Image (cartoon, helix red, strand yellow):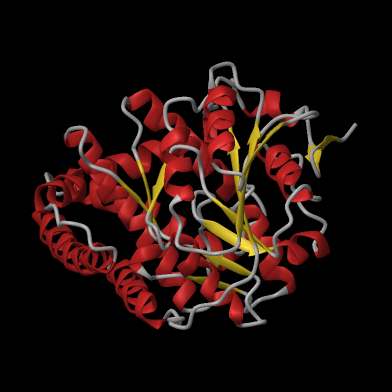
Amino acid sequence: MVLYSIVVMMNGYGWLRNVKYRQPYCVKVSVIVAARNEQNGIGDLLKDLSRQRYPDLEVIVVDDHSEDATAIVVKRWAERDHRIKYFTLEEGSGKKSAVSYGIERAGGEIMLFTDADCRLGAFWIDRMVRPFQNDQVHMVLGPVMLTAHQGFFSRLQKMEFSSLMGFTGGMSGWGNPIFCNGANLAYRKSTFEALGGFKGIDGIPTGDDELFMRKVLKDFPDGVIFQTSQKSVVVTDPPLSWKQFEAQRVRWASKWNYQKTVVESLPAVLIFVIHAATLLMLVTGFWDHLYWYVGLCGLGLRLLSEYILLRGVYFFTRQSWDFVAFAVMFLLYPFYAIYFAFKTLFGDYQWKGRQNKEEEETAPVHSGKRVD
C-alpha cells in the first residue's frame, strides 16, 4: 500500500512537470472523426468545430457503415460549412480503417482526433496544436473528462475516469506515457506515414490510440507529451447503463494485453494487487485483528494519495469537486478493480453493434483497405 501511495503521489507531481506551451502556433490542421451510428451526438460536435478559434482547419468525417441518419446530419453541416467534408468508408470496417481512410484524404500537417459524441471548447484546436511548434514533438495527448448530469452513476464514472486522466498526465510528466485516449489526440501526418500507419497492430480490433502511441514512442522516445491546458479538455457523456459501461471498460482494458513493457504493466498489476490485498486483509481480520489495523493504515494512505491526485485533476480541468462520489468510489474500487481484471481476461465485448473481438480480428486493416 505504501508503494501504491508513492506511485499515486508521484503521478500527481508528474502532472505538474508537463511542459506548458503558451505561444500560439498555426499550421493546417485536419480534424478526423470516425463515426458509426452517431446521429444523436455528431451535430453538437460539428457545431463546436465550426466555432473553433483557429484559422486553418478542415474537418473530415468518415462514416463507418452507419445504420442510422449520421450521413444526413453530417451532410447538412457540410452544406453550411465548407470546411466539413463527409466520406463513407469504402472497404474494411472498424475505427483503424476509418482513421486511416481519413488521414489519406487529409490535407493538414497535423492530424487531430476526437469522437463523434464529444463536446469541445472554442480554443481546443489552438491549445492542442501549440506543442507542435517544438519539432521534437510527434504526438500530443489531451485530457478527456466525463459529464456528470445524468444521475449518481455518471458521477461515479466521472470520478473513476478522472483517476485514469491523472495517471495519463502524471506518467507523461515523467516522460513515460502509458495511456492515451482517441477522443483527444493529435500527431503529425508525416509521423503516421513514416511509421507505416497501423501496420503491425492492424490485426488488433482496438488500440488506434494507445497501440499507435507505443509505435511512436519506440522511434521517438521523447516525442509524446500531454497537454494540461484546461482549454484543451474534451468532454463526453458516460455510458447510461451498467451493460454499456462494462463493455466500454473491457474494450479499453483489452488494449493493455498487447505489447506492454514491464514499466507499462506495473500500474495495472499494482492496482490489482493492492485492492486484492485490501479485501484479503478485511476477511482475515476476523481471525486476527492485526490485519484490520494494517488494512486501515493502508486505506488511510490510499485515501490521502488518491484525494490529492484527483483533487488536482479536478482543479486543473476546472471541474467542481464531488466529495460524495469520491468517497463511494474509494469504498467500491477494490471490488471494481478485481471484477474487471477477471472480466478482461475471460470476457468479450460488444461495441457499436459489433459483437466481439474474434469477429473483428478476421478483418485486419491498413490505410483504409482490407488486408487479406
Q: Is residue 251 left or right of residue 34?
A: left
Q: Is residue 229 above or below residue 67?
A: below
- Tell which residue pokes out farthest to the right in this image: 372
**Above or below: residue 282 compared with residue 72:** below
Q: Classify the position of the C terminus by image quarter.
A: top right
For the question of whether residue 201 can be seen, the reply is yes
Which residue extends farthest top?
A: 67
Compared across the picture, whether 28 is left or right of 344 comes to: right
**In the figure, 16 relative to 302: above or below?**
below
Residue at 38%, 23% in the rendered image: 243
Question: Residue 40, percent across and down?
Answer: 42, 26
Could you tell whether 339 is left or right of 343 in the image? left
Q: In screen coordinates, is 189 left or right of 123? A: right
Place of residue 269 in the rendered image (x, y in percent of width and height, measured from the top left):
45, 56
Relative image position of residue 66 (x, y in whole percent): 61, 22
* Of residues 271 and 50, the one drawn nearer to the viewer in this rendering: 50
Residue lying at 63% horizontally and 29% vertically, measured from the top left: 357
Number of numbered labels in the structure image: 0
Visible residue check, residue 176:
no
**Is residue 209 shown above or below 347?**
below
* x, y percent for residue 117: 44, 37
For the N terminus, the quadrant is bottom left
